[in-house]
Amino acid sequence: MNKSVITITTMVAAIGILAACGNSEPANHSNPSGTSATQSPAAGAGPADYDPKRGEGKFDDSNVKLGPIDQAMADKGKAISATKCNSCHKQTDEKLVGPGWKGVTERRTAPWIMNFITNPDAMIEKDPEAQAMLELCLVRMPNQNLGDEEAREILEYMRQVDGAK
């Protein structure tokens, strides 16, 4: 094959992969708290107020409670990840476009994960761990416009992948 055909094919494939990670349609999800997923309860707070254990967003230990794996939620999370996440993430520790998910629930808190799922731009701006992942992966995680419940379902699926009880 000619080099220009290979180059064009590679570029089209790369654009297709990047387009698969994003969703240009805004989600229409109900939000019982009345705040957007990208709003921080401490909007405008400086770096000294940033908590690296919970990240930047509305989720914290008061509104993310974990118990035994909820199989129905994990199943919904698996379905969501099949359409929104799996083009960039594997459920193993292998990096694809983004890092693999294996062990993520052991390395990060549940609020941090949910804040990153629903608020990736602010997390990448403020969180040193998210910035380190960006340096490793070289591609920003796009905002998938997922609602709170969807983020919780994905978290439950991640917990299941990690073997949480």
Image (tube, rainbow, N blue to C red):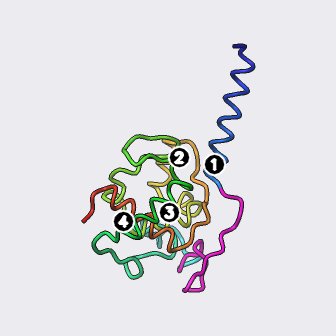
Alpha carbon separation for disc pair 4 and 2: 21 Å
Of badges 4 and 2, nearer the viewer stands 2
Residue density around tag 2, few if under 14, some if 14–19, many if 20 or more, within 10 Å: some
Q: Report the amino acid beneath label 1.
A: Ala
Residues at marks 2 and 1 touching, judged by CB atoms closer than 8 Å: yes
Alpha carbon separation for disc pair 3 and 1: 19 Å
Residue density around tag 4, few if under 14, some if 14–19, many if 20 or more, within 10 Å: some
Question: What is the number of the mark on residue 20?
Answer: 1
Q: Secondary structure at mark 3?
A: helix
Q: Position of residue 142 (x, y in %)?
A: 61, 55
* Comes first in the chain, label 3 or label 1: 1
Q: Residue tagged by mark 3?
A: 116
Alpha carbon separation for disc pair 4 and 3: 11 Å
Q: Quadrant of the N terminus?
A: top right
Q: Report the amino acid beneath label 4.
A: Thr
* Comes first in the chain, label 4 or label 3: 4
* Comes first in the chain, label 4 or label 2: 2
Of badges 2 and 3, nearer the viewer stands 2
Q: Residue tagged by mark 4?
A: 109
Q: Residue tagged by mark 2?
A: 88
